[in-house]
Amino acid sequence: MTLFLDCRLAPVGGELSTMVSINQGTSLDDYSGLAPGDLKSAIQGQNVLIGTHGFNMNRSDGIEHLSHWGTLLDLPPSSVFVGLLWPGDSVWAHGLDYSDGATIADRTGRLVATFLDASFSGAGSISFASHSLGARVVLETIANLSLPVRRLTLMAGAIEDNCLNAEFQSAAAKVGEISVLSSINDDVLSEIFPIGNLPAGIVDQGHPWWRGALGHGGPATPWPANFRAPFAIPTNWNYQHSSYLQIDNPAAPSLPIPTEVPTNGSPVPAPDLGADGVPLKGWQEAFSAAFVSSRFR
């Protein structure tokens, strides 16, 4: 069972909740609430990794994708993974209302920060991992959080490539170590993100026009002192926007899955063979989990 912090009002779409609910489960079928005392016991003295999804993902998808990805993580002892659900599907329409999506993400971050400060002081440490527009959620959380943050990994960040040294520079400075995973093959960030980001650049102060996405070409220089490279997934791996948290094999492939970003041209990780001798799928999400696990240590 995966622990979840749920900021949604509705299973699909809907507004942001005014409070964070504590739940556990692997799908909607077994999704149930937890008492605050149960959460306190689960995180007491633990190194907590909070992972969240991006836009266009409803509650059911968020539960299943984050829960599955959590099983692929190889975290050290005294660690716990916690999923974070937010209504990223409430406004998304092919990039045209990204500015509204950013507003929901920002509001989610402020709500989560208040909750963590009130409920997670007993944790040994707090770290974050995000996918897509979830980058804005966690960066806004960190910006408003009083508790220290040990690690941050931003995967396929649907946010401006200069966010770490511009809009969220002060938030980035509060983190012990920052990592990024990006792919030049990302179909969403190479096509939809610049179109959807243009209205945000006009409406919201601090969003330059036509910035590239963090999860497409990586972070703009200068990098923060606490940033750890490398970050660019080999182009021959054809890593897409959905690859990081996808579920295309319920049974995770075992090693060899690299825990660091190989050089460009490195061979695709060879997954296990099934009983019929056919290679199993699942290496993409296994790689992202292995990478985050290695940076978490």
Image: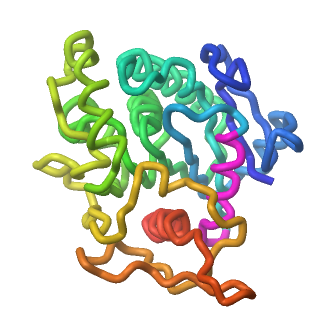
Q: How is the image coloured?
A: rainbow
Q: Position of residue 184 (x, y in %)?
A: 26, 55
Question: What residue lies at 65% left-to-right and 26% top-to-bottom?
Answer: 7
Residue drawn at x 55%, y 42% as measured from the top left: 52
Position of residue 235 measured from the top left corner of the image (x, y, whole percent): 27, 66
Q: Residue lying furthest top in this view?
A: 203
Q: Quadrant of residue 119?
A: top right
**Residue 297 in view in this figure:** no
Residue 103, x across and y down, in percent: 42, 17
Looking at the image, residue 63 sits to the left or right of residue 193; the answer is right
Quarter of the figure that contains the N terminus: bottom right
By secondary structure, the bulk of the magenta-drawn segment is best described as helix
Q: Nearer the viewer, residue 162 or 145?
A: 162
Q: Is residue 129 among the parts visible in the rendering? A: yes
Magenta residues, as a range? 61-77
Residue for point 29% across, 62% down: 231
Q: Judge by depth and name the residue closer to the eye, 141 or 196.
A: 196
Residue 106 highlighted magenta (yes or no):
no
273 horizontally vs 21: left or right:
left
Q: Quadrant of residue 151?
A: bottom left
Instruction: Examine the image and state in which quarter residue 263 appears.
Output: bottom left
Image vertical order of residue 75 relative to residue 49, above or below: below
On screen, residue 242 above or below 101: below
> Is residue 65 a member of the stretch shown in magenta?
yes
Count the marks: 0
Can you give x and y, in whole percent of width and height, for residue 78 in the image?
67, 65
Q: Nearer the viewer, residue 138 or 123?
A: 138
